[in-house]
Image (cartoon, rainbow, N blue to C red):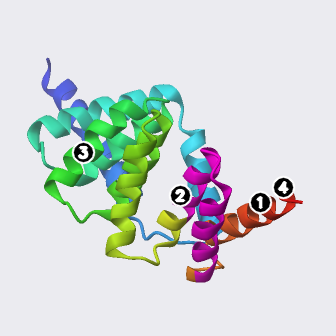
């Protein structure tokens, strides 16, 4: 490999890592417009770009196997690529390194549900609520899981708590919609 090829490879890997770090450590907002903007920017990234980013991140992970932002971005890319089982591996590693990382635990619960592990999803999401009983995202997810397994009374309880916790957040608004749908379906 020529010197210019090596430099180009290093620059591309560094750029991919920088993008991943910015995406992971950007201040999270509960404003729906910001969430939609992140979703739109993620959707506009082509599959080839995502594969390239994942390869660059994997290379960086070889150098720093315990680098949580890289692991988190890889989990996100796996999830976006329809591979929640692969995302789970990265999220478990994050939680080995940082057991109190509630963002990773929330995503782990979501991915466990996506792979059919309802018990695991409930357990991981409940761990968040043990630490913070008012975590609106975990409350919403618990309600969604219970609604999807045909336990509307339990879903209503969690969604009502989510609305009480933060009615103006995206999860609080979605929980209010869920409660309304449950109300309409019980008539």
User: Is the Cβ of the residue at disc 1 closer than 8 Å to that at disc 4?
Assistant: yes
Residue occupied by mark 1: 182
Kindly report which numbered mark, 1 or 2, lies closer to the viewer in this rendering.
Answer: 1
Which of pointers 3 and 1 indicates the residue nearer the eye?
1
Q: Quadrant of residue 149?
A: top right
Q: Earlier in the sequence, mark 4 or mark 3?
A: 3
Quadrant of the snapshot with the N terminus = top left
- SS at badge 4: helix
Check the image and name the residue furthest to the left.
Answer: 63
Looking at the image, which residue is at 46% across and 47% down?
A: 110
Depicted 186 relative to depicted 73: above or below: below
Q: CA distance from mark 3 to mark 2?
A: 19 Å
* Magenta-colored stretch includes residue 10: no
Residue bearing mark 2: 141
Which one is in front in this view, the residue at disc 4 or the one at disc 2? 4
Residue shown at 60% from the left, 40% from the top: 44
- The residue beneath circle 4 is 185
* Residue that carries the numbered disc 3 in the rendered image: 92
Residue 64, how many percent across, how many down?
11, 44
Q: CA distance from mark 3 to mark 1?
A: 34 Å
- Secondary structure of the residue carrying tag 3 is helix
Residue 11: percent from left, percent from top: 25, 40
Looking at the rendering, the stretch of residues picked out in magenta corresponds to 140-164
Placement of 27 over or under 80, stated as above or below: below
> Is 119 left or right of 142, judged from the image as shown?
left
Residue beneath the point at 45% across and 31% down: 49
Query: CA separation, marks 1 and 4?
Result: 5 Å
Q: Which mark is residue 172?
A: none
Helix, strand or loop under label 2: helix
């Amino acid at each position: 490999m020529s010197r210019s090829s090596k430099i180009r490879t290093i620059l591309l890997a560094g750029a991919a890592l920088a993008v991943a770090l910015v995406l992971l450590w950007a201040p999270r907002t509960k404003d729906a417009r910001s969430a939609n903007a992140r979703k739109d920017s993620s959707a506009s990234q082509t599959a080839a770009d995502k594969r390239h980013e994942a390869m660059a991140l994997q290379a960086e992970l070889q150098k720093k196997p315990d680098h949580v932002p890289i692991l988190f971005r890889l989990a996100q890319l796996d999830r976006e690529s329809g591979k929640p089982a692969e995302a789970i591996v990265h999220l478990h590693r994050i939680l080995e390194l940082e057991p109190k990382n509630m963002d990773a635990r929330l995503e782990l619960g979501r991915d466990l549900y996506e792979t059919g592990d309802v018990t695991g999803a409930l357990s991981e999401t409940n761990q968040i609520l043990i630490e913070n009983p008012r975590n609106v995202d975990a409350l919403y997810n618990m309600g969604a899981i219970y609604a999807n397994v045909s336990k509307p009374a339990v879903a209503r309880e969690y969604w009502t708590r989510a609305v009480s916790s933060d009615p103006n957040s995206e999860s609080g608004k979605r929980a209010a919609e869920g409660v309304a749908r449950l109300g309409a379906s019980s008539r």
